[in-house]
Image (tube, rainbow, N blue to C red):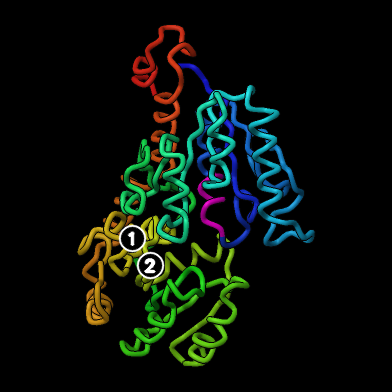
Amino acid sequence: MKKLRIAQIAPLVERVPPKKYGGTERVVYHLTEGLVERGHDVTLFASGDSLTSARLVAPIRESLRLGKKAHTPIMVNMMMLSRVYEKMAHEFDIIHSHLEYLTLPYAYKSEVPTVLTMHGRLDLGDSPAMLKSYPDMAYVSISDSQRRPAEEINWVKTVYHGYPSSCFEFNENPGDYFLYLGRFSEEKKPEEAIMLARACNIPLKIAAKIDPADKGFFEKKIKHLLDHPLIDYVGEVDDVRKVELLKNAKALLNTIDWPEPFGLVMIEALACGTPVIVRGCGSAPEVITHGKTGFICNSRLDFIDAIHNVDLISRKTCRKEFDRRFSRDCMVENYEELYYNLLPAHLFSNNKVSRYMSAV
């Protein structure tokens, strides 16, 4: 099987992998490490504080959010894309960008195939129009639901995110608390999780970061709700503390109210055997199986019923579902298959990609 020369382009907001919060960069890390382990020659374009087994090319020394030096995000990302496509593209068989829209003008002119994974929501502002301006690029969705605002463009595959099983500890005997994990933002509805905990008289631990753009929302809608004996706000946590919180939680209380494209926190919970109670929007019904790995809720009463019935969910079943659908191996194999399918046939000695694929 031909080993590929692959460029992985990560956002510069967080290092790869993130020290704390950061979904896209964590996915890029696990994908890159998996591809290296499978023998591919991988170059990771990311911040200089990143940790990787691949060759690292870094346009800035530290990630944007936690670094000491102030950068203009759009400018440094464009500088990185320029370096990839205008100076180094000939070094790669395939370029895989996680920078979404910024990549389009560069990839459109390149002779090297580009895979574009869309990590964010696509229904806001000019996003659909921008995608439709480049309809023939090789787009990857992270859930089927993510495609709805631009269904007519060239979606080549849906690839769910994945983690190594070793990242999480299964726990069949959790504590008595529920967990809200993520970010304090209006679309994630953390205030609803707090009010549900108070209504159902259950302890709720909250591990969440506050982005600068969300400080006003936090101060106005959330801060005063944290002063309650059932609520324990632990702040933004690192990976070690996150796993500890997840594995000991009775359930993840995920009160999102927006078309979330995937939701890494849901598979992180499943990996620990922790059921997920989530609103039925975005990718949630694709990730969580109602009555099997958690509950899909459409009303406040649904959430209350789910909280009272969470012990009916088998924690072993949650972990098995993670291993079956959301492992790192599943994610890497899906992307590897896609890379081979996109490559020109002349790169293979027998001109038949399928023969190589049978060996993957």
Give coordinates of residue 306: x percent, y percent. 25, 75
Q: Distance between the residues labelled 2 and 1?
A: 7 Å
Q: Is residue 50 visible?
A: no
Indicate the quadrant containing the N terminus: top left, top right, bottom left or bottom right.
top left
Q: In this view, does 135 lie above or below 299?
A: above
Q: Is residue 330 visible?
A: yes
Q: Are marks 2 and 1 in contact (CB under 8 Å)?
A: yes
In the image, 121 versus 297, the foreground residue is 121
- Label located before the other in sequence (2 or 1): 2
In the image, 183 versus 333, the foreground residue is 183
**Which segment did they paint magenta?**
22-28
Tag 2's secondary structure? loop
Does the segment drawn in magenta span residue 24? Answer: yes
Q: Mark 2 points at which residue?
A: 258
Q: Name the residue under label 1.
A: 282
Q: In this view, does 87 lie above or below 219?
A: above
Q: Which residue is drawn at 46% across and 54% down?
A: 127
Q: Is residue 296 above or below residue 145?
A: below
Give the side of residue 248 with respect to residue 101, left or right: left
Amino acid at the residue labelled 1: Gly
Q: Residues within 10 Å of mark 1 (few under 14, many from 20)?
A: many
Give coordinates of residue 45: x percent, y percent. 65, 40
Amino acid at the residue labelled 2: Trp
Write down the quadrant of residue 5 in the picture: top right
In the image, 283 versus 327, the foreground residue is 283
Does the segment drawn in magenta span residue 290? Answer: no
Write down the quadrant of residue 169 in the picture: bottom left
Give coordinates of residue 122: x percent, y percent. 42, 55
Q: Residue at x 56, y 75 (%)?
A: 214
Tag 1's secondary structure? loop
Q: How many marks?
A: 2
